[in-house]
Image (cartoon, grey):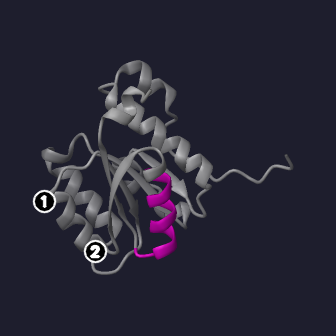
Amino acid sequence: MPDALSERTSTAIVVDDNFDSRLIARLSLEAVGYIVTEANNGKDGLALIQAGTFDLLILDLLMPEMNGYEVLNVLRKDRRHDNLQIVVLTANAHMAMGDAMDMADFVMVKPVDALRFSELVKRLKQQHHSQASPQAQDEIPLKPLEPQPPTGE
C-alpha cells in the first residue's frame, strides 16, 4: 500500500557544475520520490527555476556563468519563490557563512554524506507535504549541517 508521500509529486532541481555531486544528489532525491531536473551552472539553473515550479533547490555556490550567491540573491528577491526550500552544498564552510547562510534554508559541507543528505531531503519532502506545520519544522535542524566523522560501527 503506497503511503501519502508517494502519492504526491515533489520536484527538485540540482544546480551544480560537478557531475558527481549532481549524480549523488539526483539519486538520493529520486530514492525518496522527487522528480529531479539538473543544471550545470547558475545561469541555466535560474532560467529553469523561473520557468518551472520546484519544491526544492540543491545549490552549489561556486559555479561558472552565475554563482550560487547570485542565484540566491535573485530567488530571495522574487516572491514567487518564497516557498522554495534551498539546500546549499559547498566544499568550503567559510564560503557558506554570511549571506548564503541567511538566504538558504540549510547548508551542508561537501563531501556530503549520502545517508544524511537522503534523510534531510526525505524530511523536507514530508514537511512540504504537511504544509510546513510547526511540528514538522521543529523536527528539522536549522543551519548549518556539518559533515559527520566516520564512526567505527
Looking at the rendered structure, the kind of residue marked 1 is Ala
Q: Position of residue 151 (x, y in %)?
A: 81, 49
Crowd around label 1: few <14 · some 14–19 · many ≥20 (10 Å): few
Query: Is 34 situated left or right of 107 in this image?
Result: left
The quarter of the picture where the N terminus appears is: top left
Which residue does the image show at 52% across and 35% down from the upper left?
Answer: 141
Q: Which residue is mark 1?
A: 51
Range of the magenta residues?
A: 17-29
Q: In this image, 23 relative to 59: left or right? A: right
- The residue that mark 2 highlights is 66
**132 up-or-down from 21: above or below:** above
Please tell me whether mark 2 sits on a helix, a strand or a loop: loop
* Residue at image coords 35%, 21%: 133
**Residue at 46% of width from left, 75% of height from top?**
19
Give how far across and how far down residue 58 sits, in percent: 39, 56
Image coords of residue 134 (percent x, y): 38, 20
